[in-house]
Amino acid sequence: MFNRNFLKKIAKKENVGLAFLEKQIKNGQAVIPLNRKRRIDNPPVIGKGFKIKVNTNIGTSTEKNKIKEELEKLKIAVNCGTDTVMDLSTGGNLRAIRKEIIKNSEIPLGTVPVYEAAELAESRDKNLDRMTFSDIWDVLKGQAEDGVDFFTIHAGILNNFTKIVKKQKRIGGVVSRGGAILTRWMYVNGRENPFYENFDKILDLAKDYNITLSLGDGMRPGAIYDSTDQLQISELIVLGELVKKCRKKGVQVMVEGPGHIRFDEIAYNMAIEKKICHNAPFYVLGPLPTDIAAGYDHITGAIGGALAAYFGADFLCVVTPAEHLRHPSVSDIQDGVIASKIAGHCVDVLRFKDEWEKDYKLSYYRAKRDWKKVFPLTLDEEKARKYRESLKTSSMDMCAMCGKFCSLKILEKCKILHR
């Protein structure tokens, strides 16, 4: 799947042994999303035993479909440290937009193919219910050829789930766009999920292009009231069976997870995914442990993400302040990525010596007020510099909060505390 010299570079970057990396890839507990048509020097490895990775969603909508802004989002996300991006475009020329994003991206790119398939049916027939597997297959082949590195495939939703949807009456409904498209399609047409029915054929394509499958959680809860309910767990059980099919075929696979989850259920959700899905890498959308933080959901997502990562999640999806409210701006993307990076680092600092040393060095230089050495160690160097440079005080050797009563200076001359 990958040659050893390539894996050596990744192992060095991750600060792990080559043998461990090879073992985790072989047993399916880690993945490296990289289409055979792409050339990326240092793609991320996602999975158990490796640093927490972050994905950022960008892409047009039916209301905002200018590619220029999405390329700006791509740039700021990469600069802030995202490991992958997903193009979730639904407005404009989707293939042209995707190609432009791939051309400008030096990191792996993922998509949700059902979006484009539904858009094809809507454009052709003015009715997404007329989507066919032929539409889906054409999209999958086209995206594979374009170089997409990982697909979110909503293959775990079964036709009989529509009965549970009607009976259960969730507060949040089906908030996954892909999940909603397929649930409606199955309900209207009275047929089985085309991704599930044709999963073996999709596996062949993924194998040919070395595309990682990200098994989508179309039934993820969209409100903490719905957390860990029958629909969510029913889909997870199906995804566990699909993980085994992927591994048997030699296709890299990870599993997507919730969603809006009560704080006290996050640890359980991480454990049950790992058990049901055979320790496949877990990609979580937040999770969001409260529903009332509109405008601040990047903070909510970071709280949930840190807890999820500590208990087993491997891959955090960025949540921006615009979540649930609007199409995210460039600044929303920046805030969201930084928040997710903080969440991941809070866990990595406990597991990796090189991550611990970043905090140690920053604290050491901050104690000495050596700001020039502090700034490069921060997650957002530009913002840290701006805050510090805005300081209006008689000396740069103190802060405006403490002034001449700087706690660090009070005992410094005593030489009893600092290293």
Image: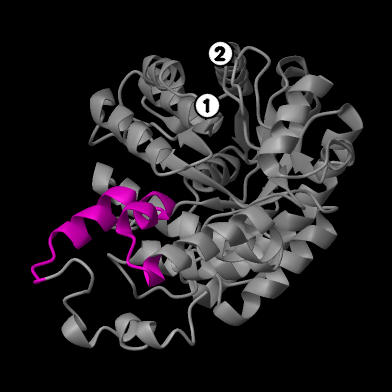
Q: Would you say the residues marked 1 and 2 are in contact, meaning their CB atoms lie under 8 Å apart?
A: no
Q: Is residue 287 left or right of residue 92?
A: right
Please tell me which of labels 1 and 2 falls first in the chain. Answer: 1
Amino acid type of disc 1? Answer: Met
Picture disc at residue 24? none
Q: Nearer the viewer, residue 294 or 396?
A: 396
**Rendered residue at 37%/68% (across/down):** 368
Which SS does the magenta portion mostly show?
Answer: helix
Say which of marks 1 and 2 sits in front. 2
Residue 333 position in % (x across, y down): 33, 47
Asked if residue 116 is positioned above or below residue 280 in the image, the reply reads: above
Q: Nearer the viewer, residue 371 or 189?
A: 371
**Residue where numbered disc 1 is placed:** 131
Residue 116 is covered by the magenta coloring: no
Within the image, what quadrant is residue 407 found in? Answer: bottom left
Q: Which type of secondary structure does the marked residue at label 2 adopt?
A: helix
Q: Is residue 312 left or right of residue 69?
A: right
Q: Quadrant of the N terminus?
A: top right
Amino acid type of disc 2? Answer: Gly
- Magenta part of the chain: 366-394
Within the image, what quadrant is residue 12 found in? Answer: top right
User: Distance of mark 1 from mark 2, alpha carbons?
Assistant: 16 Å
**Residue where numbered disc 2 is placed:** 142
Residue 368 is covered by the magenta coloring: yes
Residue 406 position in % (x across, y down): 26, 83
**Rendered residue at 24%/54% (across/down):** 385
**Rendered residue at 28%/57% (across/down):** 384
Is residue 196 visible in the rendered image? The answer is: no
Q: Nearer the viewer, residue 116 or 316?
A: 316
Circle 2 residues within 10 Å: few <14, some 14–19, many ≥20: some
Q: Nearer the viewer, residue 363 or 158?
A: 363
